Image (cartoon, rainbow, N blue to C red):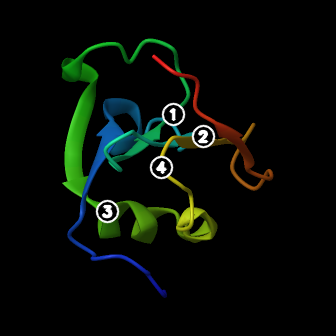
């Protein structure tokens, strides 16, 4: 695996993905550059549904995410299911 960032970079992951109950279907890069890996459910509105992990653990779990390493800040990538293509969009302002 060719990770182009520090493997211990902090990333945020939803509890569903962390528990392996749902796949990563949404990846976001926040204004500050933080990475967020989510299942795509709309109910992740508070900190209790998000955990911080080293980004290497996320890419090891799903190597298809490597194609998103160049995702710019303020951009999102979403897919319908694992194996489907990623659709990149500019994040909407808060």
Q: Give whichever of 55, 6 is nearer the camera.
A: 6
Pointer 3 residue: 55
Alpha carbon separation for disc pair 1 and 4: 19 Å
Could you tell me if the residues under marks 2 and 1 are in contact, i.e. CB atoms within 8 Å?
Answer: yes
Residue drawn at the location 56% of the way across and 28% of the way down? 40
Q: Is residue 81 visible?
A: yes
The circle on residue 73 is 4
Q: Nearer the viewer, mark 1 or mark 4?
A: 4
Q: Secondary structure at mark 2?
A: loop
Give yes or no for contact between labels 4 and 2 (Cβ–Cβ under 8 Å): no
Residue 12, numbered circle: none
Question: Which tag, 3 or 4, sits closer to the chain's start?
Answer: 3
Q: Residue most toward the bottom?
A: 2
| Number of residues whose C-alpha sits closer than 10 Å to that of mark 3, classed few (under 14), some (14–19) or many (20 or more) | many
Q: Element at badge 4?
A: loop
Of residues 16 and 27, the one nearer the viewer is 27
Do the CB atoms of the residues marked 3 and 1 lie less than 8 Å apart? Answer: no
For the question of whether residue 20 can be seen, the reply is no
Which sits earlier in the primary sequence, circle 1 or circle 4?
1
Mark 4 crowdedness (10 Å alpha carbons): few <14, some 14-19, many ≥20: some
Please tell me whether residue 3 is drawn above or below residue 76 in the rendered image. Answer: below
Residue tagged 2: 25
Determine which residue is flagged by label 1: 39
Question: Which residue is pictured at 60% across the width and 40% down the height?
Answer: 25
């Amino acid at each position: 695996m060719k990770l182009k960032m520090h493997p211990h970079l902090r990333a945020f992951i939803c509890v569903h993905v962390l528990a392996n109950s749902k796949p990563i279907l949404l990846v976001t890069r926040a204004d500050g550059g933080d990475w967020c890996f989510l299942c795509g459910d709309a109910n992740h509105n508070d900190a209790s549904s998000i955990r911080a992990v080293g980004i290497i653990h996320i890419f090891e779990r799903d190597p298809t995410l490597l194609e998103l390493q160049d995702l710019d800040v303020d951009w999102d990538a979403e897919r319908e299911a694992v194996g489907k293509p990623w659709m990149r969009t500019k994040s909407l302002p808060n």
